Image (cartoon, rainbow, N blue to C red):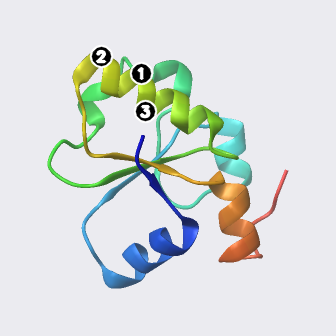
Amino acid sequence: MKEISVSELKALQDSGEDFQLIDVREANEYEFANLGGELIPLSTVMANEGKISRDKKVIVHCRSGARSANAILQLESAFGLENLYNLKGGILAYADEIDNSIPKY
């Protein structure tokens, strides 16, 4: 599975490169803190596979990286997607290393 660090994500955000950011946490978690990605909870990710881009980099994240890894494994296995990247450490790592104003839970 391909991974991306939070510093690499920040560089992508700052560069203006076109990519898709997907958050696979639950709605209440997203409301508490988010990185501005599209919310597609893990339990609905397979049913919403049509919302996932196939022609650009897609970064999938959750709280710590476990649920997003699970989502990627499911999507790669079922649909053969090869443009998915797991955000290493999830939103917790982003809060620690990039933006400490993001609340942690």
Find numbered disc 1 in the image and state the secondary structure of the residue it sits on. helix
- Residue 58 is situated, as x and y percent measured from the top left of the image, at 33, 50
Q: Is residue 54 left or right of residue 102?
A: left
Assess whether mark 1 and mark 2 are in contact (beta carbons under 8 angstroms): yes
Q: Amino acid at mark 2?
A: Ala
- How many neighbours does mark 2 have within 10 angstroms: few (below 14), some (14-19), or many (20 or more)? few
Residue at 69 percent across and 46 percent down: it is: 63
Res 66 quadrant in image? top right
- Residue 77 is situated, as x and y percent measured from the top left of the image, at 33, 19
**Residue 14 visible, this orientation:** yes
Q: Is residue 68 left or right of residue 101?
A: left
Q: Which residue does the numbered mark 3 point to in the structure image?
A: 72
Res 19 quadrant in image? bottom left
- Residue 31 is situated, as x and y percent measured from the top left of the image, at 68, 48
Q: Residue furthest left?
A: 55
Q: Amino acid at mark 1?
A: Gln
Find numbered disc 2 in the image and state the secondary structure of the residue it sits on. helix
Assess whether mark 2 and mark 3 are in contact (beta carbons under 8 angstroms): no
Q: Is residue 80 left or right of residue 43?
A: left
Q: Which mark is residue 7?
A: none
Q: Which residue does the numbered mark 2 point to in the structure image?
A: 78
Assess whether mark 1 and mark 3 are in contact (beta carbons under 8 angstroms): yes
**Residue 41 visible, this orientation:** no
- Residue 103 is situated, as x and y percent measured from the top left of the image, at 80, 63
Q: Amino acid at mark 3?
A: Ile
Q: Which residue does the numbered mark 1 point to in the structure image?
A: 74
Residue at 43 percent across and 26 percent down: it is: 73
Residue at 28 percent across and 35 percent down: it is: 51
- How many neighbours does mark 3 have within 10 angstroms: few (below 14), some (14-19), or many (20 or more)? many
Q: Residue furthest front?
A: 1
State the residue in front, 78 or 1.
1
